[in-house]
Image (cartoon, coloured by chain):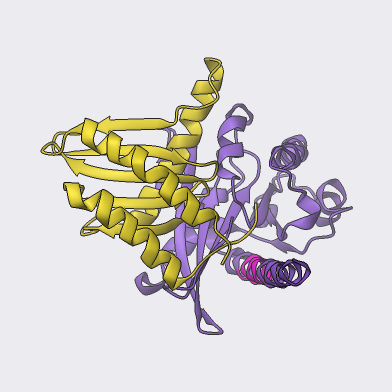
Chain colours: A yellow, B purple
Amino acid sequence: MGTMVVTTEKVKELQKVLNAQLLAIGVSLAILIDEAGNVIVAAGNENGVDTTSLAALAAANFGATAQIAKLLGEEDFSILYHKGKRDNIHFTKIGMDFILVTIFTDEIPLGLVRLRVNQVAQELLNLLSEND
Amino acid sequence: MALIDLNKREIHCKIVYYGPGRCGKTTNLFYIYNAVSEKYRGKLLTIETRGERTLFFDLLPINLGKIHGLDIRIQLYTVPGQSHYRATRKLVLKGVDGIVFVADSLRKRREKNIESLIDLKNNLKEYGLKLEELPLVFQYNKRDLINANIPLLTIEELENDLNKDLKAPYFEAAALKGIGVFETLKEISKRTVKYVARKYIFNQAHKRAQGGVL
């Protein structure tokens, strides 16, 4: 566990991927966080969303469900999904250390979000693991 | 895992307040939250049981101002102290950059302090970290109770029980009244930022050296 450094170029590249793959299908907000609960990059409409708290809770939530998974003999649950009345939230593990949080309304089909998130996962991981 | 965001010119560090149940970790955060102006702090997030005990963690983001043009943003976390929340404590420690160990000065809590410190060491070990190598500050809390004729451990006893080998700085505190709270925060922040910066510089130098060989 070292120190992660993100440069302006890296942020732009990551945002470009989130914009092209997720915001393009109507996702309201996509946030890439690390497992310590830091926001690495956010794309979309952050209005009224406390991303710092969201990142801390998402990381904790993921950690807690990973422990539940272990109780069942699973390594972890790589996808989490919570459905609300208006907004839905989807969490996906990206590699070992990162989590992609996606927030979207009922108008966007869950299947499409999952498909895009799967497609984008490797791309994000490649960008994150590249040395500057 | 600290995060250095060169795009926003921010350094994010994670400091965890650790210690046995009811020692005053959350009280420290509450005091800081109430004393710091809104401009320098984010929302205080708490996940607690009905009995006001921390269930998962408390989180308080604070902004310490600029160093070399970089904004220093610190996230203060607490853990649930009760011994049966071990798994939760381990989760909160993920990516920790600095630790405040809050010890309870009450004489009857002596064993709990020692147990909690051992638990901390074990949890860190599972992440491949050593307490000796991390920024650490002790806070001996509830010192004001000496006036209420409640049996307290002496500072020498606390030092001997907890800090004999670690030799970390310590502060006497009465977190409810704010005594020692900011002294503790200032010292751990200073040490943590220095630690993160040093690690970053070392990594950069290491990368450059590797590049040279290849």
Percent across and percent down for residue A6 are: 49, 66
Query: Which residue is painted at 30% across and 51% down in the image?
Result: A30
Magenta range is B186-197
Percent across and percent down for residue A46 are: 24, 58
> Most extreme residue toward the top, as rendered?
A72
Q: Nearer the viewer, residue A120 or A93?
A: A120
Query: Which residue is painted at 85% across and 50% down in the image?
Result: B157
Q: Is residue B12 above or below residue A91?
A: below
Q: Is residue B177 left or right of residue B42?
A: right
Q: Nearer the viewer, residue A40 or B107?
A: A40
Percent across and percent down for residue B23 are: 62, 45
Is residue B43 visible to us here?
no
Query: Which residue is painted at 36% across and 45% down in the image?
Result: A120
Q: Is residue B92 left or right of residue A45?
A: right
> Most extreme residue toward the front, as rendered?
B214
Magenta portion: prevailing SS class: helix
* Number of numbered callouts drawn: 0
Quadrant of the image containing the C terminus of chain A: bottom right
Q: Is residue B194 magenta?
A: yes
In the picture, residue A50 is in which quadrant?
Answer: bottom left
Q: Is residue A18 left or right of residue B93?
A: left
Q: Is residue A30 magenta?
A: no
Q: Nearer the viewer, residue A107 or B140?
A: A107
Is residue A47 visible to us here?
yes
Percent across and percent down for residue B169 are: 77, 64
> Most extreme residue toward the left, as rendered?
A107
Q: Is residue A121 left or right of residue B207?
A: left
Q: Is residue A132 above or below residue A62?
A: below
